[in-house]
Image: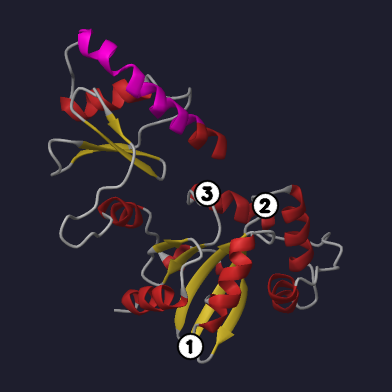
Amino acid sequence: MKNIIAAVAAAFLLLASAAHAQQESREPVRIGGPEANIKRLIESRLPQGAVVDAVTRTPFFGLFEVRIGSEIVYTDEKVTYIFNGSVLDGKTMENLTQERINRLSMIKFDDLPLAASIRQVNGNGRRRIAYFADPNCGYCKKFEREALMQIKDATIHIFIYPILSQDSVVKARSVWCSADRLKAWNDWMLKNTAPTAAGSCENPIDSIQALGQRLRINGTPTMFLANGRRLTGAVPLAQLEAAIADAAK
């Protein structure tokens, strides 16, 4: 998945240099409206196997939103130019592109395999968070210390999602096979004390990796809130608290 995204990004850079040549060409008659034509044109320039998931007309200057996996870019009807970036609301400065991505990537919280997570309960645990983290993710460690562990009255379902290296897989399995999984995880993430269990027990690590790919989780930390909203990155405590409160409405 990472390789595809990198290749897609490189392909978009090449599109700009081909814009003038494309303007002079004559495209076949479009079938199915401009959305179908845009999908065909862009897919013809992407790495083999990459697929445009959806094309939607926007209210922005006649542009169309093109969704490829968890990425969004914009183009005109003739795919003369590709805009790879965020659209901001001119009055509120809200990132409309990110908000759109967040809506498209929402899930049903109860569909998550919570039995494959490590559960930490803060306070009365009434608020729910699903947290995907790589054991070797430095941002995750910082986020846990400065924000996640400070959240009150929350149940945190920790999904160990090793995507950075083979050592991450080894540590993930070792944590899961520990007698006290939560202690082993917190000892490593908060105190830098490595887990010592053999990691040979039956574990859900492979299935969590597959789940993360289906959910298009390309980096950690990534969270899902009770309303299914996705939250990515090591967000500050205040932002996390506000997002959790909003999800409970």
Question: Separation of disc 2 and disc 1 at Cα?
Answer: 30 Å
User: Height in image: 31 above or below 171?
Assistant: above
Residue beneath label 1, please?
153
Q: Most prominent secondary structure in the magenta stretch?
A: helix
Q: Which amino acid does label 3 sit on?
A: Asn
Identity of the residue drawn at 63% across and 68% down: 141
Q: What residue type is labelled 2?
A: Asp
- Image location of residue 164, percent across then percent down: 66, 50
Q: Is residue 197 left or right of residue 90?
A: right
Highlighted range, magenta = 7-26
Tell me which corner region of the image, top left, top right, bottom left or bottom right, holds residue 55.
top left
Q: Which amino acid does label 1 sit on?
A: Asp
The verdict on residue 17 being magenta is yes
Residue beneath label 3, please?
218
Question: Separation of disc 1 and disc 3 at Cα?
Answer: 28 Å
**Which image quarter holds the N terminus?**
top right
Q: Point out which mark residue 206 bears.
A: 2
Q: Is residue 72 left or right of residue 60?
A: right
Q: Hey, which residue is sitting farthest bottom in the picture?
A: 124
Tell me which corner region of the image, top left, top right, bottom left or bottom right, holds residue 168.
bottom right
Q: What element carries label 2?
A: helix
- Image location of residue 45, percent across then percent down: 39, 20
Q: Is residue 182 left or right of residue 9?
A: right
Using the rendered image of the protein, determine whether residue 27 is visible from the camera's viewpoint: no
- Image location of residue 183, percent across then percent down: 73, 79
